Image (spheres, rainbow, N blue to C red):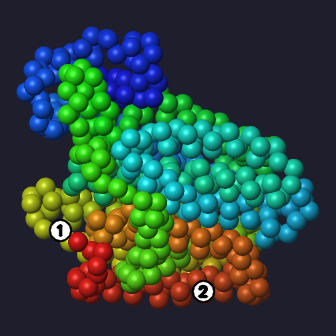
């Protein structure tokens, strides 16, 4: 029953019903029986009966009415989908030395493919996020088309013969990976009731943030066994598997899209062309020009980050947190290979320390948010955006501590576990800060949440994408005897320590800032 809902409403299931079963199966007949028996004249009120049908708590057409097991399976699918493309961001980095030798290029240029990927999946949501919210399309067509292109791109990426081509292909890969990374949380929210949304999004984010940590671990094994090119053959396999799951087991979840197609079926079955969704009626009665669309989807994310101090400060902070995550790809080799003589595979395994920190952070976050957010909403208590900030302050404190321990613990006179402990603390802080501040951002600007998130995604991806380009120089030029990454880490830790003021400032003055904002409702 649980898988039946997913299979029946997936792209493959829809094709089967349309072209093989031709929608005359007993299931379809029973599903719409009461509609075919309706008196056409009695349904002249625009959408009256259709709206009642959507609110029926017994129908699985509404994803929020799915059985719990079905929801869990779907969330795991979205999580795996996000993980499978996010792994690709840094999977090739253990093979940077091979790439430098093969293409006769510098280390900075060899890191450009990582930068291109990260920047591209910050740009992509500006185009794809609005498309997924167009009621005649929804989420699944965008997922299917972009993921298919992403899978295909792995073949030329694995075969490319020059660094310029690799950079271009990586940019395109990041661009077409962006819908999964940007809209995955929205897909999860489509099936979850409001009180549980931050909790479930936290679980989804665990999959997403595990990707950059697992990538170097898997990539290291592939680089040693074969070459850096096999990292992209692996990406072809895992993203291809995700595409198959998407085709056969993932249904549309965007409510306006589901209602639109259900309304079309009902119009055909009843002969009543007055059965329409609210989106159809609104589109018919409104005229939206290209200029308005550009203002809504392209300019507003930029404008809101310029004139809203909350958005700007969160963008800056999340860019730092994101940038530190990607700086590890330069810092880890300097510590574990140059100081402790680890092999490439052993150094790749060290990235699991970040993974451990992220898992610990997600557990603490889910427990905290459940008691401070979910329980309050379920008992009809008021909940304000500031509910997330105490946890954000905790993460803000642990981030500079973790960076400092990582840098000053990296010496031949100390055990390598010291730097790993610092990485665990930084991974913990990374997850906590990222999740709490994004939730705070979403609750502060509910009407313009898409613009606020698009702004954040663009800002942090562009800034963080540049970090790996100067990471090696940052650590190498500031090295001192016995402490090769200490002062570079200290600079990052000092900046991170200064950022602690941001969640404290929001906690103290958040209500006043929202009261002055034209975007807060």
Q: How crowded is mark 2: few (under 14 residues within 10 Å), some or many (20 or more)?
A: some
Residue 270 drawn above or below residue 239: above
> Is 308 or 88 nearer to us in this picture?
308
Q: Which residue is rendered at x = 39% and y = 87% of the image?
A: 501
How many numbered dots are placed on residues in this image?
2
Please give the label number shown on residue 259. Answer: none
Q: In which quarter of the image is the C terminus?
A: bottom left
Q: Residues within 10 Å of mark 1 (few under 14, many from 20)?
A: some
Q: Quadrant of residue 354?
A: bottom right
Provide the residue designation for mark 2. 490
Asked if residue 418 can be seen in this view, the reply is no
Mark 1 lies on a secondary structure that is loop
Q: Which residue is rendered at x = 34% and y = 16% of the image?
A: 23
Q: In which quarter of the image is the N terminus?
A: top left
Q: In which quarter of the image is residue 105?
A: bottom right
- In the image, residue 268 lies at what x, y percent? 27, 23
Mark 2 lies on a secondary structure that is helix
- In the image, residue 152 lies at what x, y percent? 68, 39
Asked if residue 180 can be seen in this view, the reply is yes
Q: Which residue is rendered at x = 62% and y = 64% of the image?
A: 119
Residue 1 drawn above or below residue 162: above
Instruction: Tell whether label 2 touches label 1 (CB within 8 Å).
Output: no
Q: How far apart are marks 1 and 2 (CA)?
A: 38 Å
Q: Left or right? Give the position of 100 relative to 38.
A: right
Provide the residue designation for mark 1. 383
> Is 443 or 175 nearer to us in this picture?
175
Q: Left or right? Give the position of 44 relative to 460.
A: left
First along the sequence among labels 1 and 2: 1
Q: Left or right? Give the position of 370 relative to 175.
A: left
Residue 98 drawn above or below residue 135: below
> Is 438 or 344 nearer to us in this picture?
438
């Amino acid at each position: 029953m649980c898988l039946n809902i997913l299979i029946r409403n997936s792209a493959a299931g829809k094709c089967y019903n349309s072209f093989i079963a031709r929608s005359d199966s007993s299931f379809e007949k029973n599903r719409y029986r009461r509609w075919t028996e309706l008196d056409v004249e009695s349904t002249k009120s625009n959408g009256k009966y259709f709206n009642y049908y959507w609110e029926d708590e017994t129908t699985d057409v509404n994803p929020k009415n799915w059985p719990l097991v079905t929801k869990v399976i779907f969330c795991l699918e979205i999580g795996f989908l996000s993980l499978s493309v996010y792994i690709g961001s840094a999977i090739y980095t253990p093979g940077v030395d091979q790439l430098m030798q093969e293409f006769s290029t510098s280390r900075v240029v060899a890191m450009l493919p990582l930068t291109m990927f990260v920047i591209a999946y910050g740009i992509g949501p500006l185009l794809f996020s609005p498309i997924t919210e167009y009621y005649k399309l929804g989420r699944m067509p965008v997922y299917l088309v972009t993921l298919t292109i992403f899978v295909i791109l792995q073949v030329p990426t694995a075969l490319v013969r020059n660094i310029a081509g690799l950079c271009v292909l990586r940019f395109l890969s990041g661009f077409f990976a962006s819908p999964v990374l940007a809209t995955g949380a929205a897909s999860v929210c489509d099936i979850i009731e409001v009180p549980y949304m931050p909790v479930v999004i936290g679980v989804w984010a665990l999959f997403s943030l595990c990707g950059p940590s697992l990538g170097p671990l898997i990539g290291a094994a592939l680089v040693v066994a074969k070459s850096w090119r096999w990292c992209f053959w692996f990406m072809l396999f895992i993203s291809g598997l995700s595409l198959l799951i998407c085709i056969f087991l993932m249904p549309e979840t965007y409510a306006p899209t589901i209602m639109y197609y259900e309304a079309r079926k009902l119009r055909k079955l009843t002969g009543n062309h007055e059965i329409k969704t609210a989106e159809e009626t609104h589109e018919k009665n409104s005229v939206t020009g290209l200029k308005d669309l550009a203002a809504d989807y392209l300019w507003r994310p930029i404008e809101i980050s310029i004139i809203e101090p909350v958005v700007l400060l969160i963008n800056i902070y999340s860019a730092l947190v994101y940038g530190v995550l990607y700086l590890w790809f330069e810092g880890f080799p300097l510590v574990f290979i140059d100081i402790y003589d680890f092999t490439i595979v052993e150094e790749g395994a060290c990235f699991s320390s970040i993974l451990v920190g992220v898992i610990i952070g997600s557990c603490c976050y889910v427990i905290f948010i459940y008691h401070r957010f979910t329980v309050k909403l379920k008992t009809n208590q008021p909940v304000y955006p500031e509910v997330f900030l105490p946890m954000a302050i905790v993460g803000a404190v642990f981030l500079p501590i973790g960076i400092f321990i990582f840098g000053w613990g990296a010496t031949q006179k100390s055990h390598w576990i010291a730097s790993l402990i610092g990485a665990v603390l930084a991974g913990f802080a990374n997850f906590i800060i990222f999740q709490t501040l994004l939730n705070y951002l979403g609750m502060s600007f509910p009407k313009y949440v898409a613009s606020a998130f698009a702004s954040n995604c663009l800002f942090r991806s562009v800034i963080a994408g540049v970090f790996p380009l100067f990471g090696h120089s940052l650590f190498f030029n500031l090295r001192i005897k016995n402490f090769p990454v200490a002062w570079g880490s200290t600079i990052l830790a000092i900046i991170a320590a200064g950022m602690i003021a941001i969640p404290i400032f929001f906690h103290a003055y958040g209500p006043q800032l929202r009261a002055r904002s034209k975007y807060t409702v």
